[in-house]
Image: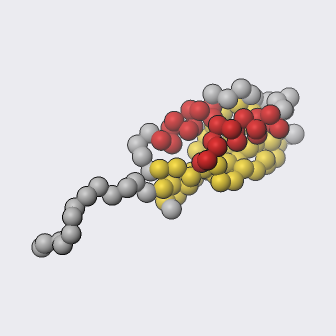
Amino acid sequence: MRVPGPIGVRPMGKVAVSFRIMPEGVEVDLAKLEAAVRKSLSTKLKKLDVKPVAFGLKAIEVIAVMDDASGEMEKVEAALGGLPGVGGVETTEVTLL
């Protein structure tokens, strides 16, 4: 079968990734942590919410949109995990756009 037209490289698709960012403890200033997350993700950030977890501990839930390239999600997760005051980062959902 012949396909008319040039054959080229198609651009990568986009994915929406949900992360749950847990602070090191209840004493962490969530406003500063939230600002650091916003700065770290900049153009990728689509949504940021602070949700209660248990006993006064709150988590930051983030949705970021990025290219569906190999290693991109891991780079973002590592960058978020390296922020001061972050106890852990968990990828909770990945969906194609």
Q: Residue lying farthest front?
A: 6
The residue located at (76%, 35%) in the rendering is 33
Q: Is residue 27 above or below residue 41?
A: above
In the rendered image, is residue 61 in sight?
yes
| Left or right relative to 22: residue 71 | left
Q: Is residue 75 above or below residue 65?
A: above
Q: Residue lying farthest left?
A: 1
Please provide percent x and percent y for residue 24: 75, 29
Quarter of the image with the N terminus in it? bottom left
The residue located at (70%, 42%) in the rendering is 38
Please provide percent x and percent y for residue 25: 80, 30
Give residue 31's quadrant in the image. top right
The residue located at (58%, 44%) in the rendering is 91
Please provide percent x and percent y for residue 88: 66, 33
Instruction: Give the camera-side residue of 33 and 92.
Output: 33
The residue located at (63%, 27%) in the rendering is 82
Please provide percent x and percent y for residue 89: 63, 37
In the rendered image, is residue 92 in sight?
no
Q: Count the marks.
A: 0
Q: Is residue 22 above or below residue 45?
A: above
| Left or right relative to 22: residue 15 | left
Instruction: Give the camera-side residue of 13 and 54.
Output: 13
| Left or right relative to 22: residue 56 | right
Q: How is the image coloured?
A: secondary structure
